Image (spheres, rainbow, N blue to C red):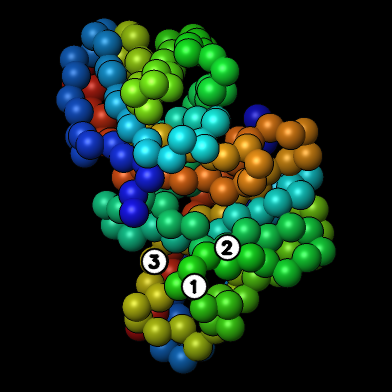
Amino acid sequence: GAVVSQHPSWVICKSGTSVKIECRSLDFQATTMFWYRQFPKQSLMLMATSNEGSKATYEQGVEKDKFLINHASLTLSTLTVTSAHPEDSSFYICSGSGTSGAYEQYFGPGTRLTVT
Amino acid sequence: DQQVKQNSPSLSVQEGRISILNCDYTNSMFDYFLWYKKYPAEGPTFLISISSIKDKNEDGRFTVFLNKSAKHLSLHIVPSQPGDSAVYFCAAIETSGSRLTFGEGTQLTVNP
């Protein structure tokens, strides 16, 4: 099956600092990558969609200057949380979909961010 | 506006019996539906999907049923196993786009 990795799996940072999370598709080319966040006992909320080489499309209410997304290659997307605050603490999950026209997204294992 | 709803936050079944997880949607433009399984602190794992041109899709112990007129889908797991215990999310997509819309999830517990 399609494998997506995320790094780091968990990170603790101080308020005001920036954190970068990497998402890699290991065995397929992800033309589109997605970033979600999940609060405890809630569903996955889509933050943004990115296509390789293009600017990300952000969902309503998501600050694009705070959550910087780069999709530089067909196997790598990064999410940078800038000037992090405690309310940014969450579980961030990326996913990728390939070029075959299938609609399935394959998810990474997630990154637990804690801002102190 | 919750376009995909899973009204049962939890379900408990006995090992060997059938698990039935339900999902309703409101957006008639959705034409592809997926089920994902998620363990705590992990990303969702794709299970099974169905196109709106079908009413049933089966893969091993997992079968998804789609009732378009009722805007309802269900996932049947038979026989249920303790390892199936997880949160199950249904998701829907308009295939003209790429955006998945997820339900709130149902915690399935399969008791030995």
The quarter of the picture where the C terminus of chain A appears is bottom left
Query: Is there a contact, CB below 8 Å, between mark 2 and mark 1?
Result: yes
Label 1 vs label 3: CA separation? 14 Å
Q: Position of residue B28 (x, y in %)?
A: 46, 35
Chain identity of mark 1: A
Q: Nearer the viewer, residue A42 or A9?
A: A42
As shown in the figure, which amino acid type bears the numbered disc 2?
Ala
Q: Where does label 1 land, which residue? A: A62
Total marks in image = 3
Label 3 and label 2 in one chain: yes
As shown in the figure, which amino acid type bears the numbered disc 3?
Ser
The quarter of the picture where the N terminus of chain A appears is top right
Label 2 and label 1 in one chain: yes
Q: Quadrant of residue B54?
A: top right
Q: Where does label 3 land, which residue? A: A90
Q: Where does label 2 land, which residue? A: A48
Mark 3 or mark 2: whose residue is earlier in sequence: 2
Q: Is residue A11 visible?
A: no
Label 2 vs label 1: CA separation? 8 Å
Tag 3, which secondary structure? strand
Tag 2, which secondary structure? strand
Label 3 vs label 2: CA separation? 15 Å
Q: Is residue A22 above or below residue B46?
A: below
Query: Is there a contact, CB below 8 Å, between mark 1 and mark 3?
Result: no
Q: Is residue B73 above or below residue A112?
A: above
Residue drawn where x is 74% and y is 34% of the image:
A101
Chain identity of mark 2: A
Crowding around mark 3 (Cα neighbors within 10 Å: few <14, some 14 to 19, many 20+) is: some
Chain identity of mark 3: A
Q: Is residue A72 above or below residue B84?
A: below
Crowding around mark 1 (Cα neighbors within 10 Å: few <14, some 14 to 19, many 20+) is: few
